[in-house]
Image (spheres, rainbow, N blue to C red):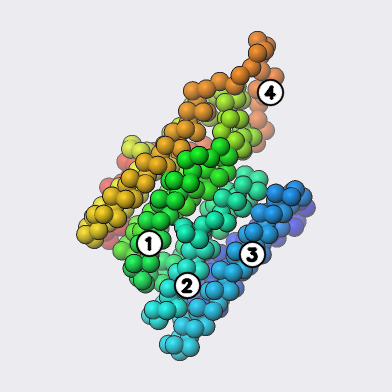
Amino acid sequence: MNPFILSILLLSLGLGTTLTFASSHWLLAWMGLEISTLAIIPLMSQHHHPRAVEATTKYFITQAAAAALILFASTTNAWFTGQWDINFNLHFFPASMLTMALALKMGLAPVHFWLPEVLQGLDLTTGLILSTWQKLAPFILMCQIMPVNSNLITFLGVTSTLVGGWGGLNQTQLRKILAYSSIAHLGWMILVMQFNQQLALLALIIYIPMTFSTFMIFKTNSSTTVNTLAASWSKTPALTAITPLILLSLGGLPPLSGFMPKWMILQELTKQDIPLTASIAALSALLSLYFYLRVSYAMTLTISPNNLNATTPWRLQTTASTLPLAISATISAMLLPLAPATLALLSL
C-alpha cells in the first residue's frame, strides 16, 4: 500500500477513536465510530485474497448494523428524555439497545460470531489493530453509560467468559484462538465494569500489551497455525523461551501481569456479594488456560519433524525492529509487583 494512503488511514483510525473519546453528544460519538470503521476497511482488504475480502464484508455488515442500532437507540433516548448528552441518565429501553449495539461492536458473546471469522481472514498486523485499538472507542462508551441493566451486563460478561474459553479449545488456527481469547478477556472487563470502571480500564490496559506481544511473536515466526509453531526453536530460540510466559500471563497465572486484573476483578465481584458469578468466571479462566498451555506446548516442547541433519538455512538475523515487542513482553510478564500501587491508585 502507498505510504501516503496508509498514513491517512492510520490517522483516520486515530481521529475516529479520539473523537469518540472526547464527545459528550451521541451523534458525535457515532460519527467517531463510523470514521474508525471506514478507516480500517481498506487496511483489511489490502491483500486481494478471497478470505480477506470475505472478512472485510462480514466486518462492514456487522459494524454497520451496530452503528445503525446505536443511532436508533440514541434517537429513541432523545425522544424519551429530550437529551443527546452521553452523561445524562438514559431511559431503560434505549440503554439496553445501546448495550447490545456496543457489545456487537466489540464482539462480546452472544453477538460474537463475526469476530473469529473476520480475524481469521486478516493478516496478523491488521488483526492486532482489530483486537486492540478498535475495541477502545466502544469500550469507553460502554464505561460512560454504566450502570445500566445489571442483569444484561452480567449475562454478557458470563456468556463471553464461557464462550471465550469453550470456543478456543478445539482451534488449530492461531488467529481464531486469539479471537476467543479477546472475547474471554472482554467478558471479564464487562463483568466488573458495572461496579468499578477504573478496574475494567486497568484490565484493558494490561490486556493490550499482552495481545500485542502475542501477535508480534506469531508475526516474527510467520506462524498462523499451531503446527507451524514447532519450527520456532530454529528461527527465534530466545523469543520461543519467553513466549510461554506471555501466553500464561494471558491465561492469568501468578506471578505474571495477567493475574493482577483477574485477581482484582474476582475480589470486586466477591465484595459485591455475587460469588456465583465470580466462581463461573474463575472456572471459565481454566478453559482459556488450557488452550494457552496447548499453544505453549506446541511452541516450546515439540520439534518440527525434519529428516535433514544440516543446519537450518532460515535462521537469519531479522531486520525488523524488536524493541516494541521487548517492551510489551516485559510489561506482559513483570507488572504484578506493582499491584499494591495499582490498588492504592484505584482506591483514591
Residue 104 rendering spot, x and y as whole percentages: 52, 63
Tell me the quarter of the picture where residue 232 sits. Answer: top right
Disc 2 marks a residue whose amino acid type is Leu
Could you tell me which secondary element the residue under label 1 belongs to? Answer: helix
Q: Is residue 93 above or below residue 220?
A: below
SS type, badge 4: loop
Kindly identify which residue carries mark 4: 314
| Residue 63 percent coordinates (x, y) | 60, 65
Cα–Cα gap, marks 4 and 1: 49 Å
Observer able to see residue 298: yes
Left or right: 142 with respect to 179? left
Residue 155 bears which disc, if any? 1
Residue identified by numbered label 3: 61
Q: Earlier in the sequence, mark 4 or mark 2?
A: 2
Of the two numbered discs 4 and 1 on the same chain, state the one appearing first in sequence: 1
Give the number of the mark in front: 3 or 4.
3
Q: Earlier in the sequence, mark 1 or mark 2?
A: 2
Residues at discs 3 and 2 in contact (Cβ within 8 Å): no
Which residue shows up at 58% across the image and 74% down it?
68
For the residue pair 33 and 301, the one nearer the viewer reads as 301
Disc 1 to disc 3, C-alpha distance:
25 Å
* Residue at x 65% of width, y 10% of height: 309
Residue at 75% across / 48% down in the picture?
Answer: 49
Q: Earlier in the sequence, mark 3 or mark 4?
A: 3
Between marks 4 and 1 in the image, the one whose residue lies nearer the viewer: 1
**Which residue is under mark 2?**
98
Residue shown at the point (29%, 55%) measured from the top left: 277
Which circle's residue, 1 or 3, is located before the other in the chain?
Answer: 3
